[in-house]
Image: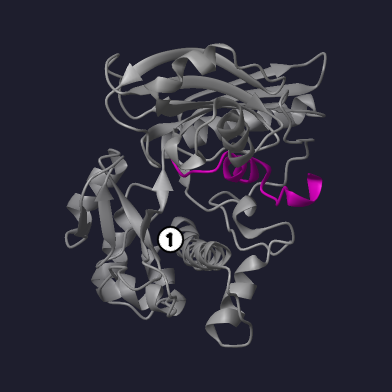
């Protein structure tokens, strides 16, 4: 596995056993809005296990007699997990749904709504994760780390799931761009380009965390020996209250959603970041991706590539919410509950806690 993620903390790696399965990994969608109870679409709250979202959609399609494209959904969910999510279908299939039965899919409840669900119609996801073989000493360390994350948040890396079984599918995309490989299957090609964008974002974020760690560890006088930056800029960045340091020219975004804007007043914007009103963003290189400026661009340009995709920006930093940790000493199990914004990876949070890659443990 190729590791491209540097985390904020430098503690000794924590050992535990974690495997994604329906018992130890549960994901529950949080809808973006309340459903109206009226309309032409039937909204289904559904629970699945041992199936990808696509497999579930195909099962519903063949059983209910409708096309997959007529089924709305807000997000894709893991196969090796118990997942609770929402789908929408035209209300004319309501009677057929009443007779639906499947050992891996359970209909929990239904309601009506005026619109078909679309990708992104999602506020976030609530996770339950059970870690095994956790010693009492490591459980105490996890307790402390959760307090840090609750107070400071966490980096918003793309997880290893984004990069295929070998963790290197982005390299195939690079070979396609360089003309060394051909790929005629459009959807697969688009997926590979997305993985390449994700890899470049992760590399950029790792670099920015490296910079932040240096500012966290050294004084301005010492940092002048590391960075060829204006002395006053170094002093301003060093004064920022948050671990992750904003740079002049960063593109930040109102949190948890809102417009992009350029960081121009470090003092004011750093205070807003500390208050969780805004968060810096990193680039997903592409045709329409807006770029940072100034000092932030000097870092970002190292990770810019010509990628034949739309491109965009992604939050660099997020705040997990409603974090709960319970240690079951008799079983040596540590149970985690937390909520993440849409598009964020629970396994990234686990890697931050473990301070080591988890892929080889799966």
Residue found at x 54% / y 53%: 158
Label 1: few (<14), some or many (≥20) within 10 Å? many
Q: Is residue 355 rendered magenta in the image?
A: yes
Percent x, y for residue 360? 79, 51
User: Which of the pair 191/269 is nearer the observer?
Assistant: 191
Screen quadrant of the N terminus: bottom right
Answer yes or no: is residue 226 visible.
Answer: no
Q: Which residue is mark 1?
A: 215
Labels in figure, total: 1
Q: Quadrant of residue 332?
A: top right
User: Which of the pair 316/24 is nearer the observer?
Assistant: 24
11, above or below 77, in the image:
below
Q: Is residue 17 left or right of residue 334?
A: right
User: Which span is picked out in magenta?
Assistant: 342-362
Q: Is residue 268 rendered magenta in the image?
A: no
Residue found at x 53% / y 40%: 76
Residue found at x 70% / y 50%: 356
Q: Quadrant of residue 132?
A: top right
Percent x, y for residue 151? 43, 34
Percent x, y for residue 118? 37, 39
Screen quadrant of the C terminus: top right
């Amino acid at each position: 596995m190729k590791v491209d993620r540097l985390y904020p903390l430098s503690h000794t790696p924590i050992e535990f056993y974690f495997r994604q399965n329906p018992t130890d990994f549960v994901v529950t969608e949080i809808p973006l809005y309340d459903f109206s109870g009226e309309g032409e679409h039937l909204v289904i709250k559904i629970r699945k296990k041992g199936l990808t979202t696509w497999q579930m959609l195909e099962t519903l399609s063949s059983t209910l007699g409708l096309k997959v494209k007529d089924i709305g959904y807000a997000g894709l969910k893991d196969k090796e997990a118990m997942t609770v999510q929402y789908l929408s279908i035209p209300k004319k299939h309501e009677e057929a749904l009443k007779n639906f039965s499947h050992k891996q899919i359970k209909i929990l409840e239904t309601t009506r709504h005026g619109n078909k669900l679309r990708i992104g119609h999602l506020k976030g996801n609530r996770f339950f994760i059970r870690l095994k073989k956790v010693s009492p000493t490591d459980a105490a360390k996890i307790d402390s780390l959760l307090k840090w994350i609750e107070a400071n948040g966490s980096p918003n890396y793309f997880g290893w799931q984004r990069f295929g079984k070998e963790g290197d599918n982005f390299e195939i995309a690079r070979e396609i761009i360089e003309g060394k490989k051909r790929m005629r299957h459009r959807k697969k090609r688009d997926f590979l380009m997305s993985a390449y964008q994700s890899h470049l974002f992760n590399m950029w974020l790792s670099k920015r965390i490296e910079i932040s760690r240096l500012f966290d560890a050294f004084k301005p006088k010492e940092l002048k020996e590391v960075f060829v930056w204006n002395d006053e800029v170094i002093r301003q960045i060093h004064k920022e209250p948050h671990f992750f340091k904003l740079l002049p020219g960063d593109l930040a975004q109102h949190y948890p959603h809102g417009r992009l804007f350029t960081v121009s007043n470090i003092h004011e914007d750093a205070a807003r970041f500390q208050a969780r009103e805004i968060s810096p963003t990193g680039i997903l290189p592409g045709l329409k991706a807006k770029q940072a400026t100034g000092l932030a661009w000097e870092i970002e340009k190292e990770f810019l590539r010509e990628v034949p995709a739309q491109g965009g920006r992604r939050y660099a930093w997020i705040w997990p919410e409603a974090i709960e940790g319970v240690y079951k000493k008799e079983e040596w199990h540590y149970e985690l509950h937390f909520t993440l914004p849409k598009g964020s990876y629970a396994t990234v949070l686990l890697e931050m806690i473990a301070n080591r890659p988890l892929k080889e443990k799966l």
